[in-house]
Amino acid sequence: MQIITTEPQTADHLSRRRIAGVSTATEQLKRMSGILVKATGIWLVIVLAAILNGIFREKVLVPTIGSSIALPLSGVALAMLVFVIALIFVPFIGASEPKAYVTIGLLWVVLTVSFEFIFGHFVAGMSWQEVMKVFNIKKGDLFIVVLFVTAISPWFAAKVRSLI
């Protein structure tokens, strides 16, 4: 029969563990929470860029070149903006693991789709069917492409910047 005892961990013991590179679950949670807060802040910049892109599309592009060209052009522009924003801001995230950037990409997609549905329906007063039209690539809406670029941008930007 083996008796297992647990000794209280002293501050010195915990310091040695930290120095050795072993972090506690609490430290990891705090670090990931900080990363997700920063990532959400960057996503707010993306939302602002998307709103400005939409205003530019409706006020300038549609009257000038028509919606059949303006919509896909705006989608390509937004996808490029998302990547450029990611490229600029990923160094501030402070993550060194590829999975953190994959998680951030997924977070951005969830936030973007949630924003699209909530804003479209409850603020803009669109029906759910109208909100769903953003997924209609046949009519030139490239929102699905923007979501794909949004998902991969944090990871790809971190790779380009040699952060991972």
Image: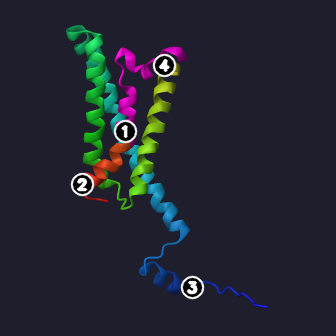
- Distance between the Cα atoms at labels 4 and 3? 56 Å
The quarter holding residue 105 reads top left
**Amino acid at dot 2:** Arg
Q: Amino acid at mark 4?
A: Val
Q: Position of residue 159 (x, y in %)?
A: 28, 54
Q: Position of residue 39 (x, y in %)?
A: 39, 48
Q: Residue 131, labelled with which disc?
A: 4
On screen, 80 above or below 104?
above
Dot 4: few (<14), some (14–19), or many (≥20) neighbours within 10 Å?
A: some
Which quarter of the image is occupied by the N terminus? Answer: bottom right
Q: Amino acid at mark 1?
A: Thr
Q: Secondary structure at mark 3?
A: loop
Q: Which residue is mark 1?
A: 150
| Residue position marked by numbered label 3 in the rendering | 10
Q: Which residues are magenta?
A: 123-151
User: Which badge, 4 or 1, comes first in the chain's sequence?
Assistant: 4
